[in-house]
Image (cartoon, rainbow, N blue to C red):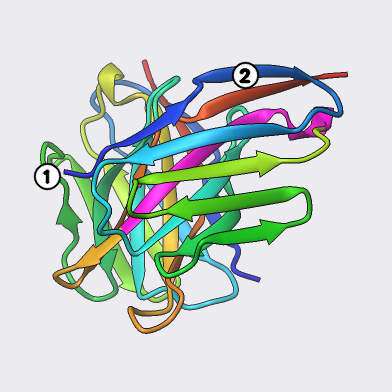
Amino acid sequence: GAVVSQHPSWVICKSGTSVKIECRSLDFQATTMFWYRQFPKQSLMLMATSNEGSKATYEQGVEKDKFLINHASLTLSTLTVTSAHPEDSSFYICSAGTGGYSAVYEQYFGPGTRLTVT
Amino acid sequence: KQEVTQIPAALSVPEGENLVLNCSFTDSAIYNLQWFRQDPGKGLTSLLLIQSSQREQTSGRLNASLDKSSGRSTLYIAASQPGDSATYLCAVGVSGAGSYQLTFGKGTKLSVIP
């Protein structure tokens, strides 16, 4: 149980184009989903937190107009990188959260999406 | 701001050895702490989750301890195997103001030599 998928697993796009990454919780409903970015040999950095049906909360330094997040259902969140540039090339990982503050709260992570912008 | 540090950054051991990975965090007001495994180019696999009220968790050959007051956690791996080779990430969970966040360390890259 608690499986999270991401699609695509890797994508190459040209500079200036937009790319959409999907994150799905396959066997549970996720009230909250998180998007992370990981540069080579670096740790995961939280980009934004999204709750189903509401606007995402972005971390400081993350441009909300560049990284569009939509969490339209309890099983799907999407991250769209708009007008991508080579410096946006990175490994993007999503996670889906379960439970609440009175219970065990855990994030289940997707397998990641490797984005390369040429 | 919570900061998580993992030492060592890399570790190489012969097969069969027991080993300890270290994680320290600056703010002891945590909700939980998780250890993950990440294989090259892959996502994260959760290994152990310790709630702030717990001292340790065990799963098979893995044992994680938590000393919240000193801001430290250790991951003990017994009888290491080549298949244990991966990067191990420590993440501290903090809740508050309607949000929940994980702050990650940079990881320890483990190589187990056959």
Q: Amino acid at mark 1?
A: Asp
* Front residue of A117 and B85: B85
Which one is closest to the eye, mark 2 or mark 1? 2
- Horizontal side, residue B45 vs residue A116: left or right: right
| Subunit bearing disc 1 | A
* Front residue of A58 and B59: B59
Q: Quadrant of residue B37?
A: top right
Residue where numbered disc 2 is placed: B11
Disc 2 secondary structure class: strand
For image coordinates 18% across by 73% down, the residue present is B98
Determine whether B95 is above or below A52 in the image.
above
Q: Position of residue A83 (x, y in %)?
A: 21, 31
Q: Position of residue A102 (x, y in %)?
A: 36, 84
A61 in magenta: no
Marks 2 and 1 sit apart, C-alpha to C-alpha, by 41 Å
* Front residue of A68 and A109: A109
For image coordinates 29% across by 46% down, the residue present is A80
For image coordinates 53% across by 48% down, the residue present is B35
For the N terminus of chain B, which image quadrant?
top left
Q: Position of residue B59 (x, y in %)?
A: 72, 58
For the C terminus of chain B, which image quadrant?
top right
* Front residue of A117 and A94: A94
Q: Position of residue B74 (x, y in %)?
A: 54, 42
Residue where numbered disc 1 is placed: A65
Local packing at callout 1 (Cα closer than 10 Å; few below 14, some 14-19, many 20+) is few
Q: Amino acid at mark 2?
A: Leu
Which region is colored magenta? B81-93
Most frequent secondary structure within the magenta stretch: strand
For image coordinates 59% across by 43% down, the residue present is B75
Local packing at callout 2 (Cα closer than 10 Å; few below 14, some 14-19, many 20+) is some
